[in-house]
Image (cartoon, rainbow, N blue to C red):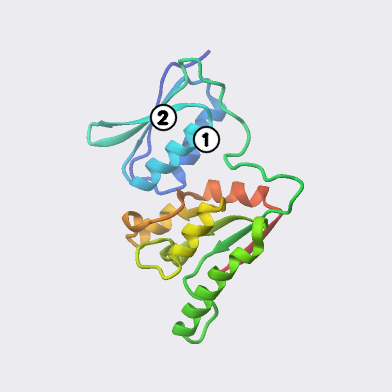
Amino acid sequence: MKKPEYVIDCRGLACPAPVLRAKETVEQEQVDRLVMLVDNEAAKENVSRFLSRAGYTVWEEETAGALAVVGDRRAGMSKPAAAPVATAPAAADAKIMVMVGTDRLGKGDDFLGGRLMVNFIGTLKEMGPSLWTLVFLNAGVKLACTGSEVLPIVQELAAAGVQVLVCGTCLNHFHLLEQKQVGETTNMLDIVSHMQLADKVIALT
């Protein structure tokens, strides 16, 4: 039997827990309206994006001091998709996912490491259409924020069609959520889904 509404309180839960709760409910329950109560911007963006991709019309409401992300598919919306939240790459071309978990390359000299990272990000465009997704996590999220020397390069890559994902938990940790200037604020579920769909993953830590 379908349940007209399902309310899940995710306040106090760090990402990716809220979006995982939403995913579990969508997959296991016949629910037309899902209300997710969250208390941080990263969880709001991640849950909203997931519900939208799952076939729900999504909006936000303020309720009892919490932020409610509401997903509703009663007005003729399609059934939530069971496929991963990421978009599958075309089979004809190898799709490479680059994960950047640091704001500098190598160990020894921090200044040199920073210069090497600038050179690395600047050279990524040479991969052409093979560069499918660029993920920033841990200290790497600083590269997608205000003041980053490589920000214009990352913005250029995004404008050219490269998916840019920026870890919301990491942005929160470094107090940079409001400073992010490019890409989607994402969670570990999205990152793992993209890893599954990529033909090759290059990780810099």
Q: Evaluate whether residue 51 shows in this view.
A: yes
- Kind of element beneath mark 2: strand
Q: Is residue 23 left or right of residue 200?
A: left
Extreme left residue here?
Answer: 65
- The amino acid pointed to by label 2 is Val
The x, y position of residue 118, in whole percent, is: 50, 74
- Kind of element beneath mark 1: helix
Whether residue 81 is situated above or below residue 187 in the rendered picture: above
Whether residue 72 is situated above or below residue 152 in the rendered picture: above
Can you say which quadrant of the picture contains the C terminus? bottom right
Closer to the camera in the image, 127 or 100: 127
Q: Closer to us: mark 2 or mark 1?
A: 2
Whether residue 98 is situated above or below residue 27 in the rendered picture: below
Distance of label 2 from label 1 (alpha carbons): 15 Å
Whether residue 86 is situated above or below residue 131 in the rendered picture: above
Q: Residue at x 34, y 59 (%)?
A: 176
The x, y position of residue 84, in whole percent, is: 61, 39
Extreme bottom residue here?
Answer: 108
**Residue 170 occupies quadrant:** bottom left
**Residue 12 occupies quadrant:** top left
Q: Residue at x 47, y 78 (%)?
A: 114
Q: Evaluate whether residue 205 shows in this view.
A: no
The x, y position of residue 165, in whole percent, is: 50, 53
Q: Residue at x 38, y 56 (%)?
A: 180
Answer few, some or many: residues within 10 Å of disc 1's Cα (few below 14, many 20 plus, some between 14 and 19). Answer: some
In this figure, which residue is indicated by the disc labeled 2? Answer: 58
- The amino acid pointed to by label 1 is Lys
The x, y position of residue 146, in whole percent, is: 35, 63
Answer few, some or many: residues within 10 Å of disc 2's Cα (few below 14, many 20 plus, some between 14 and 19). Answer: many
Closer to the camera in the image, 117 or 13: 117
Q: Residue at x 49, y 69 (%)?
A: 102
In this figure, which residue is indicated by the disc labeled 1? Answer: 23
